[in-house]
Image (tube, rainbow, N blue to C red):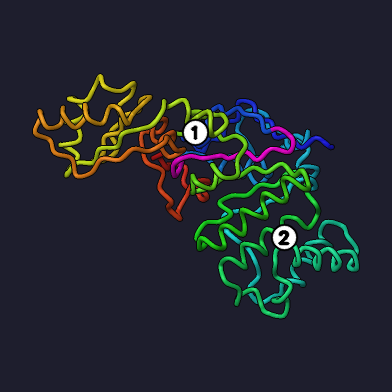
Amino acid sequence: MSNREVVVENLVKRFGDFAAVDGVSFQVKSGEVFGFLGPNGAGKSTTVSVLTTLSLPTDGVATVGGYNVVAQAAEVRQIAGVALQEIGLDPIMKSMELLTIQGQLFGKSRRDSMARAKQLLELVGLTEFTERRVGKYSGGMRRRLDLAMALVHQPDVLFLDEPTSGLDPSSRRDIWAEVRRLNREDGITIFLTTQYLEEADELADRVAIINRGKIAVEGKPADLKAGLGGESINVTFIDIDSAKRAADFLNGIAARVQIDRATVRLYLQGAASAVATVVGKLNDAMLPPVSLTLTQPTLDDVFLQVTGQRFTADLTDDADDTKKPDAKAA
């Protein structure tokens, strides 16, 4: 197998005095699905724009498939496929036309380009809609076509920036299935940014969370969740002030106590056996909870721990932070 790694060493991207990416380092192994997560404005899409040669780094080194993204940008474009958050498909054209032109841009003959286009349309389930103009496609159909466009030249590395943003659950699952197939059957390395933590947990071999331009944590999803402790007791109160007072009373019961809006989360082994103690202490403090649940740690809990905020599936992201040098990380 060819070199399908992505290696980033001390990557910096500044806009004036603002460091959108501030000394980021990580390595994506060949054939791996790597999830890249972070709050709005954290630097996710800025990093992707550098790795896909759409933006020049201020400092540091990055290679894709062994090629330097600055000195060998043309080679990177030949071996990398890119499906960005904003879908740039001509609405008046048809899918076969778009895919054929894309193939010719990568040096294929018209005949070979058309053959590849037919293959890809079958792959993404759009063969029944070749006569429909792209402007008439649903959001899910446009996402699948955008994925096909990124696969025209049979890339070694595929960058997916928010690939299921705005899609209904059924369309999202279709994209997930195709991502898995591309990775498992074709060995494509996949670099995935997503606004859905469930998506990263489902697809990624490893994840990294970027916060304020720096990598906050990196590892396998299962390991990151296990690092929080066992189960969590989640106690919700009528307001944030009650939650803060309750956290003071409950401190010491668990290895870690986290306040998330009006909910207090206690992470500990054998959480079920501690429920009676928690309820007793709350009764003594005259702080009746609205609800109490037991859950296993999730990537959302990891995200909350390392960034101090809950991950929100907001359709606006740092995709345009290259236009906002004064933007601040959330």
Q: Earlier in the sequence, mark 1 or mark 2?
A: 2
Q: Nearer the viewer, residue 105 or 145?
A: 145
Image location (x, y in percent) of residue 127? 74, 72
Q: Residue at x 44, y 38 (%)?
A: 298
Q: Quadrant of the N terminus?
A: top right
Residue 44, quarter of picture: top right
Q: Quadrant of the C terminus?
A: top left
Residue 96, quarter of picture: bottom right
Mark 1 against mark 2, which lies toward the viewer? 2
Q: Is residue 223 part of the magenta span, yes or no?
A: no
Q: Residue at x 80, y 42 (%)?
A: 75
Q: Secondary structure at mark 1?
A: loop
Determine whether label 1 and label 2 are within 8 Å by CB.
Answer: no
**Residue 313, above or below 277:** below
- The residue at which mark 1 appears reads as 213
**Residue 158, above or below 272:** below
Q: Is residue 69 left or right of residue 50?
A: right
Amino acid under label 1?
A: Gly
SS majority, magenta: loop
Q: Secondary structure at mark 2?
A: helix
Image location (x, y in percent) of residue 169? 51, 60
Q: Residue at x 58, y 65 (%)?
A: 140
Residue 240, quarter of picture: top left
Q: Which residues are magenta?
A: 29-41
Image location (x, y in percent) of residue 10? 60, 25
Q: Is residue 32 part of the magenta span, yes or no?
A: yes
Q: Residue at x 23, y 22 (%)?
A: 251
Q: Nearer the viewer, residue 78 or 1?
A: 1
Amino acid under label 2?
A: Met
Q: Residue 149 — which label?
A: 2
